[in-house]
Every structure is written in C-alpha cells, then in structure tokens.
Image: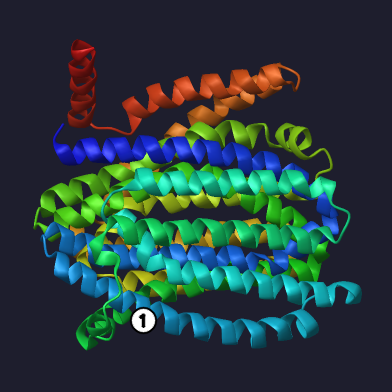
Amino acid sequence: MDQQNKLIASNTIVTYSRTILNVFLSLYSTRWVLQELGENDFGLYSLVGSLLIVLVFLSEKIINGVSRFYAYEIGRSDYIAVQKYFNSAISINIIFSFFFIFLSLTIGEYFITNILEIPPTRIYDSILVLRISVFSTVLSLIAAPYVAMFTAKQNLIDLSLTLILQSVLSFIGIYCMRFFVCDKLLLYTILMCIVYIITYSIQIYRARHLYSECHIKREYLFEKRRIIELTKFSFWNLLADLGHLVRTQGINILTNLFFSTNGNAALGIANRVASQSSSLTNSLSNALSPAIISYEGRSETKKALEISLLSPKIGIILMLYFSVPLITEIDYILKLWLNNVPKGTSVLCISIITMFIIEKTTLGLEILLQAKGKIAKAQTTIAISYSLSILLAFIMIKANIGLLSIGAACILSMILSRIGIIFCAKEVTHIELTDWFLGLVIPIIILSLLLFSFSFLITNLFNASIGRLIANILLNAILTTFLSFLILFNHQIRKRIINFIIKNKEKG
C-alpha cells in the first residue's frame, strides 16, 4: 500500500473505533433520556430540539464544502490559498450565523406558538429549548471552517478524540440527570448545549495550534473571488441541505399535527437508531472524501474514480453488518433497550434504516461530484426529491396508512434523489443508469435477500433472547463478509483483496 492508502486505512480504523463507541454510548443513554423526560417531553424535544440536530447536520455539510477547497489546494501544495479560503469561510459563516439567528427567533418561535400542537403549559419551555439550541448551533457554524481543516489534512485521529470526548461528556451528563429535581427537558437541553460548547471550543483551539492556515488575517477575510467561489459552492450545498431541512422538520411537524408528541417520540427514537446504524458508513465517507478530492487536485482522475466506485459497495456492506439483525430483531431490541416503546417506533426504525441503505448507493459519486465542483444539478435534484417527502407523506396519511406513511415517504424520496444523482454523475463518470442498477443495485438486492432470509430463519426457529440476538449478529457478520466478497466484487477486486491478505499474513 502507498502512503495515501495507509492514511485512508488508519483514518478509517480510527473513525470506526470512535463511531462504535459513540453508537454504544448514544443508544444506551437514549433509554435514560426517555425515562427521565417521559414520552411527551421526549417527543417535544425531538420536535423542537431537532432544530439543533438539523443545524449540526448543516454545519457538517458546510465543513464538507469548505474542506473540498482546502483539500483541493493541499493536493496542489498551495498553502497560502488554503489560508485565504479559511478566512473567507470565517467571514461567510459569521454572516450566515446572524441570518440563522434572525430566522430562528422569528419564524421558529412563531411556529412554536401558533402552528405546532404543543401543550399550552410547555410553550414557554419549548421556546427556551429553541433559543438554547440556537446558541450552541451558532458556535458549531463558527467552528466549521476550523473543523474542516482537520478533515482536509486527513487528521481524523485528532478530530475523533474530540468527538469521543463529546460522546463521553454527553453520556455523563445524561446519567447525572437522575440526581436533579427540576424541569428535565430544560436541563437536558442545557447539558447538551454545554457539551457542544466545550467540544467546539477545543476544536477551534486545536486547529489554531496545529495549523498556521487557521489564523485570521484581515487582508484575507474579504477576498471577493474566493468569497464568490465559496458562496456559489455553499449555495448549492445548502440547497440540498434545505431539502434535508424540509424533509426532517416538515416530517416532524406533519407527525406532530397528525400523531401528536407521541408520534414525535417514536420518530425521534427511530432517527437515533437509524442514524447510529448509518454512522459507520458516514465515517467511511469522512475518511475517503479528502483523499478523492486530493487525487482530483493532483489530476489523478482515474484513481479518484476508482475509489468513488468502490466506496458505495464498502459502505453498504458496513450498513448490512448492523442493519440486518437490527431490522429482524427490532421489536426485541426496542423492548430490551427502552422497556416502554412508543407506538409505531419499530415501523419507523425499519423505514429510516432502509432509507439510509438506499442513500449509500451513490456515496462515492457524490464525493466525486464535490471534488470536480459539478454539484448544481445534483444538489437541486436532492432538494426537490427530499421536499417531495412531505407531499407523499400527507397523501398517504390521508389514505389512512398511519405512521408508516412517514417512513414510506422518506424511502420514496430517497430513491428519487439517488436516480437523479446517477443522471448528474453521468456527465462526469459516463456511468449509465442501467450500469448502476445492474452493477450495484441488483447485487445489493440479492445480497440483502439472502442475509434477511438467514436472519429471519433464526428469529423464527428460536425464542427471543440475548443468545438469539448474539447468534443473529455473529451469523450475519460471517455471511455478510463471505457473500459480499462473492456477490458485490468483481474478479479483479477479489484478487486484490486476496493478495493483500496474503501479503499482510506473510509480514505477520
């Protein structure tokens, strides 16, 4: 392996280790949160506090967009340009933060007081939750250009340590909630805000200490050309994020209007479960993204394309390791985990996990489009497709399909967005829709059917227990590894994997 591949491998291992720890801590602590807040307040936080989750997602997208420019210039070894892009990103994000504060404290509060189905006694507390969430999110937006430097420099070890600290502090804070006698909804919001303030402050300090590019210079702050470049790129990124915002917040509001805060509680839990099952693949994206962009910056287009086409297969394998036993054992896992499970949670969990699996089918192509700066059509497609989920959900709710309407709408909108991305990527990679469908989608369907068949066989042969769950996870891990090797990879890739294993075995 060359130095770049070793860096990708080490970053992937580190981010996976961090992600596994985060999954464990997050899922375990959710049970405590549900117990301490109660179903109604948990649903209320999922509704109002979801703004924080969405905007942390937005800040991550901003990080990805900014790191694209950093990584591209790092690939060209132009470090002065990196510093100029950093300063331009700082000025843009500060302006965006003021815009966000204005929208949140006007439109956001209007929705809480006039639109959403919130008990009158909790309206004031809901506004406080919104304001606290806004405060911590603004810090995340300001920190985004600093965090992007860690990603662009492929220093995911340092970044992962900070995120591990974030997970541990959140876990400790949630555990300590049981010792306080007060409004637990406000306490939980304040604790999460403090955790974000601590971790983002550390990331800013570390970036300034490690990288000379992360120093503000007045003469670089308002370079017109770079601000226009970043703004154009960020506009198209944020357009897709707007679609994500419409989908998540719109679905939350729709759930609230038709299924009350109990429905929001079920949706909140489903989002947590599904996002954790998807997090390993997100770690893969974080590890591969700067490498693909740097290759493109060095004009090594063939290498960038090779990694881009391989990454969705690896990403989906990682999803299937956890998703198959999670889906087949969902009722038992939810009962074991939460004890009191909000109605409809299992249906939403399965739907949103399925949606995330579909999302991964274009993982590498999205990164490649970012690297080439060809994102306008793709991001527009994503924004329109995601926004359609509200209309689709409303139609199905009116058809009395129930909470399943929410999950089905998310799946359909995700399928539309992936097809759109393939058409957009055709201009860059010359991949046809039929090539993508026959070369990736059909093998994934075959692989999934086989894995789910074995997993459902176990659940039908044995009674629900910890032993059955462990057996299901272990068998699925073995079968996923073996069948993926045979079904997803062509002869050339299989040969390279075998040679790599033999080579490392001889070294050992």
Kindly identify which residue carries mark 1.
91
Tell which of 320 and 176 is nearer to you: 176
Across the whole image, how many numbered discs are drawn on residues?
1
Seen at 85% across and 53% down, the residue is 38
Query: What is the basis of the colouring in this image?
Result: rainbow
Quadrant assignment, res 5:
top left
Q: Is residue 420 visible?
A: no
Seen at 24% across and 67% down, the residue is 69
Whether 257 is drawn above or below 302: the answer is below
Q: Position of residue 168 (x, y in %)?
A: 59, 43
Whether 333 is drawn above or below 375: the answer is above
Residue 397 in the figure: left or right of residue 196: right
Inspect the image, locate mark 1, and give the three-letter code of the amino acid beneath it: Ser
Q: Quadrant of the C terminus?
A: top left
Residue 28 in the figure: left or right of residue 506: right
Q: Position of residue 274 (x, y in %)?
A: 59, 47
Q: Quadrant of the N terminus?
A: top left
Q: Position of residue 211 (x, y in %)?
A: 27, 59
Q: Is residue 415 visible?
A: yes
Residue 30 in the figure: left or right of residue 443: right
Whether 462 is drawn above or below 4: the answer is above
Tell which of 44 and 177 is nearer to you: 177
Q: Position of residue 497 (x, y in %)?
A: 23, 25
Instruction: Categorize mark 1 by other alpha carbons within 10 Å: few (<14), some (14-19), many (20+).
Output: some
Seen at 83% across and 49% down, the residue is 36
Secondary structure, mark 1, is helix
Seen at 51% across and 43% down, the residue is 164
